[in-house]
Image (tube, rainbow, N blue to C red):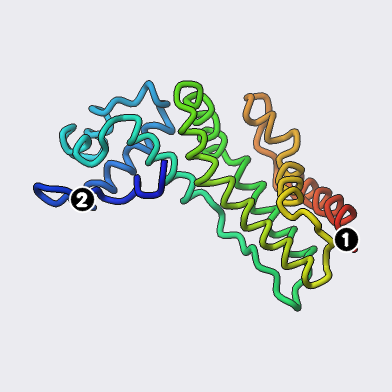
Amino acid sequence: MSDNLLQPQSGPGRPKDPAKRLAILEAAKRLFMSNGYEGSSMDAIAAEAGVSKLTVYSHFTDKETLFACAVESKCEEQLPPLRFELRADASIDSTLLAIGRGFDALINSDESVAMMRLVMTQTGQNPELGKLFYEAGPQKMLLAMEHLLQQADQLGQLRVEQPQRAAEHFFSLLKGGCNFRRLVGCGEQPSSAATDIHVQDVVSLFLRAYRP
């Protein structure tokens, strides 16, 4: 799925109302997140959005397309406003701590856990949805982190020969066992104190591996 799924489709006939499209998309996100894919009918989404079912189909060809657009939109709004830039006078330690805390809060939030579970249940029927989710969320963060690590290498704060692999190492360490337990339903959202200890441990370990 490409980014143009989120853009109003042009064509003959009456121009489509962007406000109605947005209302449908917001309604779809709420219902898919709360009721799952199978539990969210196009009739229910239309009623939630305050439009007719015909209007839903005029903006989104079918339920699968609407779900794909909802997933992409949800990923984009969930991406934390993290600063993946390293100024010459900034410390890589503090930059990694800030990114780590933001990322940990994101992946362990109730909404993100529900989103991940929902996507995983649907990719068996439609692998394209998994690709869409990855490109809309995780891949964007990995690319931003890769750029940051390249900066740190150029400034001499780190020695990173393969920034893509190093970025994956960093985020994988942050996920750790806590996020896995959250996904399988046998763990609670960690306290702020526990989160901070975990992030500091990860950053310390990462710096020991990549410090010059």
Task: Indicate the quadrant containing the C terminus: top left, top right, bottom left or bottom right.
Answer: bottom right
**Label 2 Cα crowd, 10 Å radius (few <14 / some 14-19 / many 20+):** few
Disc 2 from disc 1: Cα separation: 52 Å
Picture coordinates of residue 90, whole percent (x, y): 75, 73
Q: Quadrant of residue 81?
A: bottom right
Residue at horizontal 72 percent and vertical 67 percent from the top: 151
Circle 1 residue: 211
Q: Amino acid at mark 1?
A: Arg
Q: Earlier in the sequence, mark 2 or mark 1?
A: 2
Q: In the orientation shown, which residue stands out farthest toward the left?
A: 13
Q: Quadrant of residue 92?
A: bottom right
Q: Quadrant of residue 110?
A: top right
Picture coordinates of residue 201, whole percent (x, y): 83, 49
Q: Amino acid at mark 2?
A: Ser
Camera-side residue of 11 and 108: 11
> On the picture, is 150 further left or further right than 84?
right
Number of labels in the image equals 2
Residue at horizontal 76 percent and vertical 46 percent from the top: 169
Circle 2 residue: 10
- Classify 194 as above or below 116: below
**Label 1 Cα crowd, 10 Å radius (few <14 / some 14-19 / many 20+):** some
Q: Please, what secondary structure does the residue beneath circle 1 have?
A: loop
> On the picture, is 138 further left or further right than 73?
right
> On the picture, is 6 further left or further right than 176?
left
Residue at horizontal 62 percent and vertical 64 percent from the top: 83
Q: Please, what secondary structure does the residue beneath circle 2 have?
A: loop
